[in-house]
Image: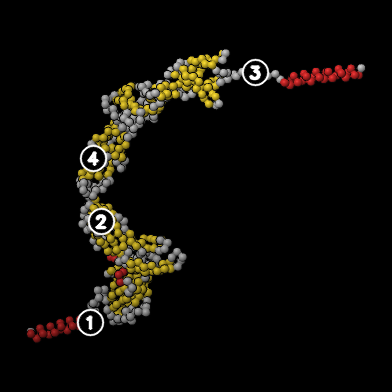
């Protein structure tokens, strides 16, 4: 029994030894006997991911001697060539990966067939990437608690000197991130950011990539361009969510066509909140509101204006708007005989109108009259002075519209009306003159001498009897005395005293002709006597 047991264990030991001797050797390589090492850019390899721009040279290290073969899943993307090079080790074959036109990724299968007939195989994913000149990333706005992974764009200079660029794919593991204020925004190794509290911070992104290439300049010649660790900085603004909203006024009163904007108070007051809201009017026909909160009163009535937060907090606040009736418009003032006529357009719903006046637009307007019409003659004025007017509408519902004051009228000067010379009768060197027009303090008469108007008389009534010559031109002006100074009207139209008398002189030519005819007749008589 003991002998049989020894024979059993002896046979078992022999079998185990033979198994160990003849079984395939376990690879000490992580890649099943094959190791690929990049020659010119080790930073472009991450595990089984290989990133290729123009080309990439690599070595293949094998666990045993044998032949190495390659298989690319898509030959339109990449091509593998033998490229020993001047520095190639005879024990480490060197190869080159060349990208083709297709932009897709491909699978590279590396296979080792040993001299002993054993086969080792491993796979790599080849990504085509372009050598970049810079990286770009946009600023971001977040609310507290939100997370996002920003999109980072690689930029390639198609023509570096002409600034012709296009976006390219980046190698993710080559991007490094840092936050200037981690208390506001945190960022992990993959670029994921999280908003922690309200405020603003800078995120710096560095692409650990070295690139040197010959690129064409503007003259078509090639120059060397070097890119080393391009960096981008973007701003992340974090907003606190609103906890409460309110307005300074709960009730607002406006005139028709008046505009208004009321500020919104948001809480927390010391927080960083987004000043963007949605505005709604309960009655758009009475009060309109735009996206910025600007109100416009359209017609009389009431409306409720509500503002809603847009940060997801679902907070809101409201205030009411009362629109009053129209104010008086087109207030006009015109000069008339001894007064100023003030007119304006009627207002629907008006009971009466209060008229206010000032002699200077910067002075206080004083109430001078109340009327239920839209025209008023203001005779309590002084000649030669300017006057300005405003109208206040008094509504039928009481005092609701008492404060609705119109715009100011244009200034009007109280002036005298120019008189007219209606009649001039000339007889025996004297002229009877009649003047028509408003009754003023007096009138001054003028004649034209040497093309100038010269005053010849001042009268108190509308008639005058003056010694004048025929053919003279007359004018008249009215006047009043204000504060010791005479204020004159414009000149009347011209009036003549009649046609000027001109004495006719006897013709000298006729007398001369008679004398000549007498002389001729005398000469003829003398000649006739001589002939006899």
First reached walking from the N terminus: tag 4 or tag 2: 2
Q: Residue furthest bottom?
A: 3
First reached walking from the N terminus: tag 1 or tag 2: 1
Q: Is residue 72 visible?
A: yes
First reached walking from the N terminus: tag 2 or tag 3: 2
Q: Is residue 21 above or below residue 222?
A: below
Q: What SS does tag 1 mark? A: helix
**Label 4 belongs to which residue?**
247
First reached walking from the N terminus: tag 1 or tag 4: 1
Q: Quadrant of residue 256?
A: top left
**Label 2 belongs to which residue?**
201
Is there CB contact under 8 Å for labels 3 and 4? no
Q: Is residue 53 visible?
A: no
Depth check, front residue: 102 or 158: 158
Indicate the quadrant containing the N terminus: top left, top right, bottom left or bottom right: bottom left
Q: CA distance from mark 1 to mark 4?
A: 90 Å
**Label 3 belongs to which residue?**
503
Q: Position of residue 317 (x, y in %)?
A: 23, 40
């Amino acid at each position: 029994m003991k002998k049989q047991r020894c024979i059993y264990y002896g046979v078992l030991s022999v079998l185990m030894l033979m198994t160990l001797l003849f079984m395939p050797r376990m690879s000490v390589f992580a890649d099943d006997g094959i190791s690929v090492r990049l020659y010119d850019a080790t930073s472009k390899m991450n595990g089984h991911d290989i990133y290729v721009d123009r080309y990439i040279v690599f070595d293949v290290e094998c666990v045993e001697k044998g032949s190495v073969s390659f298989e690319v899943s898509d030959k339109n993307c990449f091509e593998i060539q033998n490229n020993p090079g001047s520095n190639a080790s005879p024990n480490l074959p060197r190869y080159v990966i060349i990208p083709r036109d297709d932009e897709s990724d491909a699978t590279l299968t590396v296979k080792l067939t040993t001299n002993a007939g054993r086969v080792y195989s491993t796979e790599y994913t080849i990504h085509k990437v372009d050598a970049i000149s810079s990286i770009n990333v946009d600023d971001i706005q977040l609310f507290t608690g939100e997370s996002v992974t920003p999109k980072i764009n690689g930029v390639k200079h198609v023509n570096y000197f002409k600034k012709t660029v296009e976006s390219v794919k980046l190698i993710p593991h080559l991007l490094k991130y840092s936050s200037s204020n981690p208390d506001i925004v945190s960022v992990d190794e993959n670029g994921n950011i999280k908003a922690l509290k309200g405020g603003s911070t800078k995120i710096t992104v560095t692409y650990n990539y070295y690139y040197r290439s010959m690129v064409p300049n503007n003259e078509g010649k090639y120059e060397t361009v070097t890119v080393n660790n391009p960096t981008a900085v973007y701003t992340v603004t974090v907003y606190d969510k609103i906890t409460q909203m309110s307005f300074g006024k709960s009730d607002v009163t406006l005139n028709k066509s008046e505009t208004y904007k009321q500020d919104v108070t948001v809480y927390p007051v010391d927080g960083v909140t987004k000043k963007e809201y949605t505005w709604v009017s309960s009655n758009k026909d009475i009060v309109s509101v735009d996206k910025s909160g600007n109100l416009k009163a359209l017609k009389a009535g009431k409306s409720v204006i509500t503002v809603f937060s847009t940060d997801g907090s679902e907070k809101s606040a409201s205030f009411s708007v009362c629109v009053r009736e129209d104010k008086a418009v087109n207030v006009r003032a015109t000069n008339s005989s001894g007064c100023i006529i003030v007119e304006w357009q009627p207002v629907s719903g008006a009971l009466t109108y209060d008229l206010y006046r000032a002699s200077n637009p910067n002075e206080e307007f004083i109430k001078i009259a109340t009327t239920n019409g839209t025209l008023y003659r203001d005779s309590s004025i002084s000649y030669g002075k300017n006057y300005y007017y405003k109208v206040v509408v008094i509504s039928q519902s009481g005092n609701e519209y008492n404060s609705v004051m119109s715009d100011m009228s244009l200034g009007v000067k109280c002036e005298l009306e120019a008189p007219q010379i209606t009649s001039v009768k000339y007889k025996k060197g004297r002229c009877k003159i009649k003047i028509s027009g408003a009754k003023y303090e007096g009138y001054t008469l003028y004649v034209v001498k040497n093309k100038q108007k010269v005053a010849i008389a001042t009268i108190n009534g509308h008639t005058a009897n003056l010694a004048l010559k025929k053919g003279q031109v007359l004018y008249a002006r009215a006047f009043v005395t204000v504060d010791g100074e005479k204020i004159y009207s414009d000149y009347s139209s011209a009036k003549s005293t009649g046609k000027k008398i001109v004495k006719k002189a006897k013709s000298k030519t006729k007398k001369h002709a008679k004398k000549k005819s007498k002389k001729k007749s005398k000469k003829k008589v003398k000649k006739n006597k001589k002939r006899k």
